[in-house]
Image: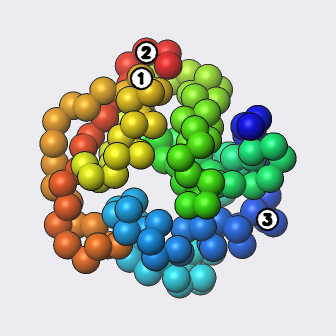
Amino acid sequence: MRVTLREVRDGDLPLFFTYMSDPEATRVAAFTSAEPSDRAMFDAHWQRIRGADTVVMRTVLADGAVVGNVGVYGPPDEREVTYWIDRAHRGRGLATAALRALLESVPERPLHARAAADNAGSVRVLRKCGFTVTGTDRGYAEARGEETDELPFRLDGRP
């Protein structure tokens, strides 16, 4: 499967909303928006993202089909990666390929990431891309409605 990245287009947003409001997927991700099914909140969030000079956000395509998004955001020295692949497409290496492609196009380092400690898929993606765990943390996971163990990651070099 060929994975490519491109600029986010208006037509991608309805798919992103569907992917990111899937209750099973948000539970696994844990640290999501407070109301993943609120379309107005989703649209306002994406309007801010797309209007910010400091955010690099890309649509992930697998063999030409939109399967998710990947990005970098945050102030210098605290830049963080984010990614979301539709649950139907997980487990096939798409998130790893997408994140690697993004890391090749974004030279700044260090980069940071966070994942729920029990989100084995996300932890695996980050490790495959060269991120290392820097400690442990706990945070309130909106999708779970409870405090959840979290792993902070850091990438200093090229993947």
Location of residue 103 with respect to 49 vertically, above or below: above
- Give the residue type that dot 1 points to: Gly
Q: Nearer the viewer, residue 147 or 128?
A: 128
Q: Residue at x 44, y 71 (%)?
A: 24
Q: Is residue 108 left or right of residue 8?
A: left
Whether 38 is drawn above or below 2: the answer is below
Q: How is the image coloured?
A: rainbow
Q: Which residue is mark 1?
A: 130
User: Measuring 34% from the left and 51% from the top, which residue is drawn there?
Assistant: 119
Q: Is residue 106 left or right of residue 109?
A: right
Q: Which residue is mark 2?
A: 157
Quote the CA–CA distance across marks 3 and 1.
32 Å
Q: In this image, 31 relative to 91: left or right?
A: left
Residue 21, how many percent across, how many down? 53, 75
Rendered-image quadrant of the N terminus: top right
Q: Secondary structure at mark 1?
A: loop
Q: Going from the N terminus, do you reach mark 2 or mark 1 first? A: 1
* Secondary structure at numbered mark 3: helix
Q: Which residue is mark 3?
A: 10
- Observer-side mark, 3 or 1, equals 1
- CA separation in Å, label 2 and label 3: 33 Å
